[in-house]
Amino acid sequence: MSKGKLILVLLVIFAILGSAAYAVFHLYQKENEDPLKYKAEKASVETVILKSVATGSVQPRKEIQIKPQISGIVTELLKEAGEQVNAGDVIAKVKVIPDMVSLNNAENRVNRAKISMDNVQQDYDRNKILLDQKVIAPADILPFELNLRQAKEELEAAEDNLQIIKKGVAKRSGSATNTLVKSTIGGMILEVPIEEGNSVIEANNFNDGTTIASIANMKDLIFLGKIDESEVEKLKPGMDLIVKIAAIEERTFNAKLEYIAPKGIEENGAIQFEIKAALTMDEGEFIRAGYSANADVVLDKRESVLCISEALVQYDKDKKTFVEVKVGDNQWERRDVELGLSDGLIVEVLGGVSESDELKLWNQPIKE
């Protein structure tokens, strides 16, 4: 065989071998290439807030129930819900309807006091004449003077008691009267649950009494809510809360946690603990009492840190966290990552990726 033919044969053989090697390599690539295509996302600088949610409502810190000092009939209401009042302002007037047994006992007491007074007065007058005639010494009349003063005091007390039962005011009290129901604090009237003509009862050992009005300082509001026992040990007084009121859209309010109940209450099979937080409002802002609200309790917070979506994070059999970084067209490389605080949607990245890396959204393949 000539030299030229030998070279030609060798070239053909090398061409065949090269084609075979390329085909094998191409098949290997195809075999190892992911048949699916995936979207990619990048890390970004975010603020991560770990929070728990408490449900409740917005309430005044103190709501005072105004009750009458006597029982009777409401003859006049001078205030209505929504009005501002000062301590001492008259809210309502009550007409006394005497209890017949109490009235009869009071009248009998007055009669007995008058009889006693007449008897003591006669004794004093007789002994005063004897003193003037110098039949008895001045010291002998002192017991009669004492008895007279005591009888007068008892008569006045009996008459005052009768006057109070009849009209709700004693003769010696001047302008003071129990028939005027006055506010004990300054604030806004939230509710007047009675009407003119209603009967009202004073508070006593057997009855809480009839509420004439409820009054509160509407500039001092709190979030009153409940939180599950699984979250309560994460809370500490002084923590920040973000309050969302259902009736006030696109507005959140800051609050400071003040109180965590030491004892839980069972509700619907779960143990709930009461919490209170002071609500921060803008100057002149008004929020109605009783609004339902949710509070995000800020357990931890990282501001302006590198974050990735939780959907990008994968776990190997050893529970190590990693992501897949794009290195070519639909080609990905494993990268171990160190993670920090998570809010369930995004997680802080402490190391392993940069802001420019494209990360595989591994559980959302693109459908072609």
Image (spheres, rainbow, N blue to C red):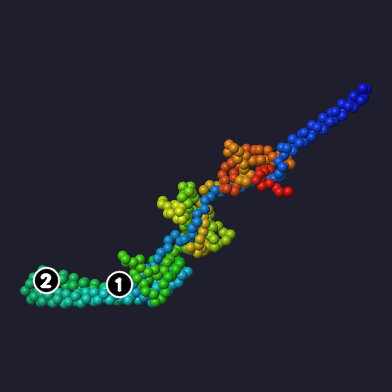
Residue 192 figure quarter: bottom left
Residue 350, compared with residue 214, is above or below; it is above
Please state which of the two labelled residues, at mark 2 or mark 1, is closer to the viewer.
Answer: 1
Where is residue 24 shown, x and y percent of the image?
77, 33
Where is residue 356 shown, x and y percent of the image?
68, 42
Q: Amino acid at mark 1?
A: Ser
Residue at the image point whose x is 51% and y is 64% from the top: 286
* Quarter of the image that includes the N terminus: top right
Q: Is residue 294 left or right of residue 314?
A: left
Residue at the image point whose x is 24% and y is 74% from the top: 105
Residue 168 figure quarter: bottom left
Where is residue 224 shown, x and y percent of the image?
47, 57
Q: Residues within 10 Å of mark 2 (few under 14, many from 20)?
A: some
Label 2 sits on residue: 141
**Do the residues under discs 2 and 1 have CB atoms within 8 angstroms?**
no
Label 1 sits on residue: 173
Residue 78, compared with residue 3, is above or below; it is below
99 and 367: which is toward the camera: 367
Of pointers 2 and 1, the one earlier in the residue sequence:
2
Give the structural element (helix, strand or loop) at label 1. helix
Q: Is residue 273 visible?
A: no
Q: Is residue 289 left or right of residue 363?
A: left
Residue at the image point whose x is 71% and y is 49% from the top: 367
Q: Is residue 246 left or right of residue 269?
A: right
Q: Amino acid at mark 2?
A: Ile
Q: Is residue 60 visible?
A: yes
302 and 150: which is toward the camera: 302
Residue 176 figure quarter: bottom left
Where is residue 234 shown, x and y percent of the image?
48, 47
Residue 310, compared with residue 97, is above or below; it is above
